[in-house]
Image: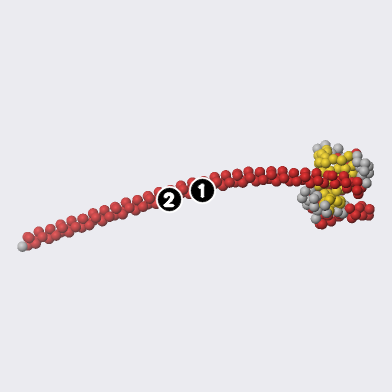
């Protein structure tokens, strides 16, 4: 009986060891499976991240290319628009000058007794007789026996234009270009299609005649005021 009991205990021990071994082997397998699964998850996450980074890089590169293309297209469009505006401004300025020119002749005769015209010219380009490197274009000039009318025309007149014209007139620089007229009285006229009251007042203050539409025709808007100023001075 003791022998059989020992044999049974040995069998139980062996069975327990076998069971523990199977448990350990199963746990090892589970551990290996878990580690393999974790590794696969990490690898997949790495692939996903690399793919995402590649997509983001490609998207950033495409966005940068699109931005550069848009910028180049916009700059080209802006250059074209600037050219168009410049052409339109030049054409408008030429149209206004051509509209004003015939009226200057009438004004010269009506207000300044300019019947015998020695010279008249539109968009006259001259070089200074003092400084050969200086060239200037004059919108319209009418030279008579005693006076010479100098007209400055602006399609969109600004205060800066008037001040610049006034400084030029006061400087006497005009006669550097036309020394043959230095004995004539210079009559400055600033003209446009329309001149606001503020601009007319500024022209009057500067001793410059304002020429613009008055009703259906062009006329001097401040003749009496400017003439009175000349007489007082």
The reply to whether the C-beta atoms of the residues labelled 2 and 1 are less than 8 Å apart is no
Where, quadrant-wise, is the N terminus in this rendering?
bottom left
Q: Residue at x 39, y 51 (%)?
A: 45
The outermost residue toward the left is: 1
Q: Which residue corresponds to mark 1?
A: 60
Q: Quick check: 148 left or right of 23?
A: right
Res 194 visible:
yes
Given residues 22 and 197, the one toward you in this image is 197
Label 1 secondary element: helix
Q: What x and y, as percent, mark residue 22?
A: 21, 55
Q: Residue at x 63, y 45 (%)?
A: 77
Local crowd size for mark 2, using a 10 Å CA cut-off: few (<14), some (14–19), many (≥20): few
Residue 229 appears in the rendering: no
Tell which residue pokes out farthest to the front in this image: 216
Which quadrant of the structure image shows residue 141? top right
Q: Secondary structure at mark 2?
A: helix
Label 2 and label 1: CA atoms lie apart by: 16 Å
* Coordinates of residue 227 in the picture (x, y in percent): 91, 53
Label 1 environment density (alpha carbons within 10 Å; few <14, some 14–19, many ≥20): few
In the figure, is residue 13 to the left or right of 62? left
Name the residue at 85% across, 40% down: 121
Q: Where residue 140 sits: x, y (%)?
A: 84, 43
Please tell me which residue is depicted at 43% across the width and 50% down the height of the picture. 49
The image shows residue 163, relative to residue 138, as above or below, that is below
The residue closer to the viewer here, 124 or 45, is: 124
Ranked by sequence position, the earlier of labels 2 and 1 is 2
Residue identified by numbered label 2: 49
Q: How is the image coloured?
A: secondary structure
């Amino acid at each position: 009986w003791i022998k059989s009991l020992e044999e049974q205990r040995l069998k139980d021990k062996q069975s327990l060891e076998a069971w523990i071994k199977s448990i350990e082997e199963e746990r090892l397998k589970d551990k290996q499976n878990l580690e393999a699964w974790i590794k696969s998850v990490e690898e997949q996450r790495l692939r996903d991240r690399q793919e995402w980074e590649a997509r983001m890089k490609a998207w950033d590169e495409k966005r940068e290319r699109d931005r550069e293309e848009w910028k180049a297209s916009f700059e080209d469009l802006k250059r074209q628009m600037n050219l168009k505006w410049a052409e339109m401004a030049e054409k408008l300025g030429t149209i206004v000058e051509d509209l004003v020119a015939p009226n200057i002749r009438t004004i010269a005769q009506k207000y300044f007794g300019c019947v015998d015209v020695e010279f008249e010219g539109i968009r006259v380009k001259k070089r200074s007789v003092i400084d050969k490197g200086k060239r200037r274009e004059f919108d319209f000039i009418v030279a008579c026996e005693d006076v010479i009318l100098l007209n400055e025309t602006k399609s969109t007149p600004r205060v800066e234009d008037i001040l610049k014209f006034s400084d030029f007139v006061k400087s006497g620089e005009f006669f550097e270009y036309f020394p043959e007229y230095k004995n004539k009285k210079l009559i400055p006229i600033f003209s446009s299609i329309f001149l606001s009251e503020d601009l007319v007042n500024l022209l009057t203050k500067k001793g410059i005649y304002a020429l613009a539409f008055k009703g259906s025709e062009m006329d001097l808007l401040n003749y009496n005021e400017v003439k009175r100023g000349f007489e007082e001075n």
